[in-house]
Image (cartoon, coloured by chain):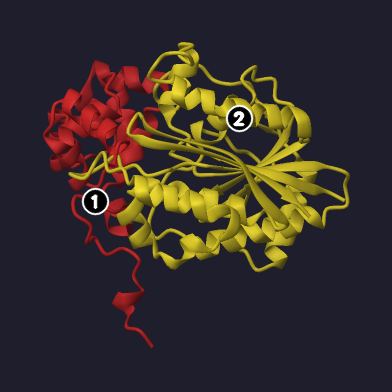
Chain colours: A yellow, B red
Amino acid sequence: MATIIGGITTSHVPAIGRAIARQLQDDPYWKPFFSGFTPVRQWLAEVKPDIAVVFYNDHGLNFFLDKMPTFAVGAAAEYRNADEGWGIPQVPPFAGATELSWHLIESLVAQDFDLTTCQEMTVDHAFTLPLALLWPDQKWPVQVVPVCINTVLFPLPSAARCLALGQAVGRAVKSWQRDARVVVLGTGGLSHQLEGERAGHINKPFDIAFMDSLAKDPAWATRYSINDLVREAGTQGIELLNWVAARGALTGQVRELHRNYHIPISNTAAGLMLFENRD
Amino acid sequence: MPDSSSLRQVKDDIYGTPLFDGRAAARGYALNKMCFSFNEAANRAAFKADEDAYCERFGLDAAQRDAIRNRSVLELIAAGGNAYYLAKFAGIFGLDMQDIGAQQTGLTKEQFKARLVAAGRT
């Protein structure tokens, strides 16, 4: 029986990739961000997951606006990073957990989620940087399943729908008859806004309230409409939907083990949380 | 039964916060498609070599071409540009998100960065 051993949620700003490429981890600007990952790496070294299921949003690498699935699940044997326009060095490819991908797809469609399946899929910074933060040597010890949520082209799926998607993923993993240890990731956020006269919007009280809610009250964010989440967290802060989905996948006894919160990284309030999940 | 307008998600009622909805996506399709092409280094080089010819190839309209020429983020957004795609355009000139933010808010880059730092102290 597969088990979900825990979840990790983190921001995913492209500038992190530039900082890694330039080895700025100990630079005064970056240190408060990078140092937050040390306890998470220690936890990963102890619990040794085999597979990472990653909730994230694509920013115009794999998906253009010609076809925009609300929920897409990867089912590829390998996932590659590619140039997103800034020429940042790319990370090594990731091995796909294809058997789990298809199990998830079967199970999610049976639970009435209408998915897009992707047998070829590039993965952008929202996927690659969190993994590079967790495993800095970039020798990936996990196979992966990408789950991409549209946070780019409105209308977006509601927080309630993303939570339900995560819960369905959690049930699906638990029903997989394999001896696998799965960690769930949710990437993006927290509050930030790139465009408009309100560019630079950051909302620390909202971010803190959101992080405080996750362990005990994962449905907290569902009280907000998408419009209200944008008002509070900003047009890109809405990426917190990936956190809501990842938290939803933790269906057992959930305990917060670690968090970090730092303003700013680029234009973003950077958040990091680690949850243990015991069935 | 709510009327159809109350079922719409996009309300455009948040100050200085354009939401990238179907209307914007349709308006900006050619512009965003051009910016999507900047994922490839060869296309970035082709744009730099002849901007007008490159815009022509993607069928940008006059307002979009002016906005590109002016390097104006607010004009690009008004012409349907999406922030994630415009970031690829900005990257060609080595502009980062603080440059973009400063331009849209009428601040200097240092002022914009100071505002971000201040948001962490509240």
Identify the residue shown where x is 38% and y is 35%: B36
Task: Say which residue label 2 marks.
Answer: A131
A212 left or right of B66?
Answer: right
Kindly report the distance in space between the C-alpha atoms of the residues bearing marks 1 and 2. 31 Å
Up-down: is A63 above or below B109? below
Residue B43 on image: x %, y %: 36, 23
Identify the residue shown where x is 32% and y is 24%: B91
A13 left or right of A250?
Answer: left
Q: Do we see residue B34 in this rendering?
A: no
| Circle 1 chain | B
Up-down: is B104 above or below A279? above
Element assignment for label 2: helix
Disc 1, disc 2: CB below 8 Å? no
Name the kind of residue labelled 1 in the image: Thr
Outermost residue on the top side: it is A22
> Based on the displayed image, in which of its 4 quarters is residue A80 positioned?
top right
Quadrant (top left/top right/bottom left/bottom right) for the C terminus of chain A: bottom right
Residue A51 on image: x %, y %: 74, 38
Identify the residue shown where x is 38% and y is 88%: B1
Up-down: is B24 above or below A262? below
Residue B67 on image: x %, y %: 15, 36
Name the kind of residue labelled 2 in the image: Leu
Residue A270 on image: x %, y %: 43, 35
Outermost residue on the bottom side: it is B1
